[in-house]
Amino acid sequence: LNYGVPLRAVTVQNEPEFPAPWEACSYSPKVQADFLAYHLGPQLEKDHPDIRIFMFDHNKDHIINWAKVILNPKHPSSKYVSGSSYHWYAGGMDRLLDGAVGTPNLHRMQDVMRKLNVSDDHIVFNSEACHCPYTGYAGGDPENYWARAERYAHTILADLAAGSNGWVEWNLVLDSVGGPNHLNNLCDTTILAVPHRAINGSDIPPIMDWEKSNAKKRFGPNHGDERTREELNALGFPATHLDAGLAVQPMYYYMGHISRYVRPGSRPVMGLVDNAMDGFRAFRSPGQVVAGGGMNDLARHGIELTAWPCEGSTRQQFRWNDKKHITVSGHDWLGNPTTSCVSNTFDKSFKGITLTDCLNKKEVASFDMVEAGDDGSVTFVQVNETVHRCLVLEKLKNNGGAYGPRGGAQVTYGDCNSAAALWKYSDVLGEVISELLPEGQVCMTTGWPFLQMGAFETPNGESDKTVVILNEARDAANYVLYDNDEPLISGTIPPRSIQTLLLD
């Protein structure tokens, strides 16, 4: 049968590492490589030679392992694969980490593909992303659904900078609670169907008969349905769309700041939020000691330690305490206070250190801070009887992509005698600074900074060049946009907002 839907590509299997309760089939890299080489690849080449095959289709943690097997030119699978797809999920059930981890692995992916002589037209893209559980509309907490929008924008910009060719949201439209789903896996998306809110929708029930999930029992009342049209409009759900039976959420507009202007055929170019030329920090003025930006919602278990240009924010404020722990404090999206510590090992999949709960004595690292020079440099030597190692800065593969070497270099463990182990620590400011990179100093960071950007050549867009600026802080930030040393435009970005600049 031909339904007139053009089919461009297929993946071998959704989430092949997960024997899910829904339609699924578990593969190992070798099994998928063999299936590609001796079954799916030859059959599609014979019957549908125009259809591409993408490998993997799972999370960033293991994409390198799969690439080394399936894209290896010594295995016949490699000649049938035109692309690699991945998902944004962190794995496990901590959904606040979705979209927050794994970017360094995308840089490694680019490096691995070069070493394997993979074709330049090999596509790497995010094939699935969504926030779970429940929806922003039904949950009703503006803090939550705004943070979800910010997370989308952050991850899209970071992935594109790391070499990804595209980014796909899982769902086009869902109902108000995140269904239907035959296994009650209720998740969020950018647009929700709420026909009962339409001007002529008074006879339509809030929940259709085909929605079998008991969302009220699991999550409580649907707060979006409890609110008036005017209340929802004030909270970021435009009334004009509600009148048509659609709840268009902030995620839609955050994505639109990128997708409407960074059109197919665009290319990311070097762009990074840096310190002001006079050394000022974006969120802390000279002479001040209080870090700005508002609460650090990344000071939590599982977040990667990275390094970025110093912005003077709470995401870059660490304390070496009397227990010899390196701590960082904040709140999570749900408003719960958090104090996390540097863990005593690095993540085996991501190769960098992640934060852990300070109450978890088995995972928390202790450090001696040892003077290492007349310039104020120190090393953080892990207190461990069997291993002599220090906190070190690990350079990104792929030279950091469009963000460059300073755009998210990893913090991990390594040789205490290397230059990468040298830091400058300010107990007053809470900054932990590395001067390893010739491009400039960087500050230890929980995840990523509040203020971010993406720069693109956009030949098929509304302008030749497009710059997207994202501010996750609760403070406004002033900026000057430079092209090399030439200032182009100055401006201010309000708190919790996103801007798109179109430049000819």
Image (cartoon, helix red, strand yellow):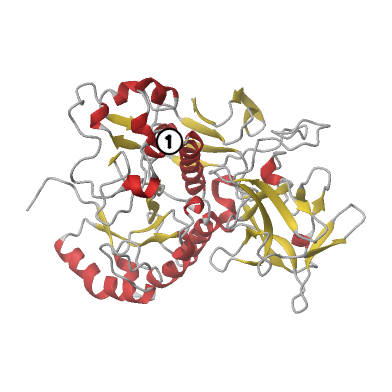
Question: Is disc 1 placed on a helix, strand or loop?
Answer: loop
Residue 228, placed above or below residue 432 = above
Comparing 404 with 201, the one in front is 201
In the image, taking residue 54 as reference, residue 48 lies left or right, namely: left
The image shows a total of numbered marks equal to 1
- Please rate how many residues cluster around mark 1, counting C-alpha atoms within 10 Å: few if below 14, some from 14 to 19, many from 20: some
**Residue at screen point 67% across, 61% down:** 359
Residue 218 lies, in percent from the top left, at: 37, 50
In the image, taking residue 481 as reference, residue 231 lies left or right, namely: left
Residue 283 in sight here: yes
Q: Residue 84's image quarter?
A: bottom left
In the image, taking residue 272 as reference, residue 200 lies left or right, namely: left
Residue 402 lies, in percent from the top left, at: 55, 46
Q: In the rendered image, which residue does mark 1 sit on? A: 140
**Residue at screen point 69% across, 66% down:** 413
Residue 442 lies, in percent from the top left, at: 71, 47
**Residue at screen point 38% across, 68% down:** 17
Residue 435 in sight here: no
Comparing 34 with 242, the one in front is 242
Residue 179 lies, in percent from the top left, at: 28, 46
Which amino acid is tagged 1? Gly
Looking at this rendering, what residue extends furthest in the left direction? 1
Residue 289, placed above or below residue 377 = above
Q: Residue 242's image quarter?
A: top left
Comparing 241 with 217, the one in front is 217
Residue 146, placed above or below residue 377 = above
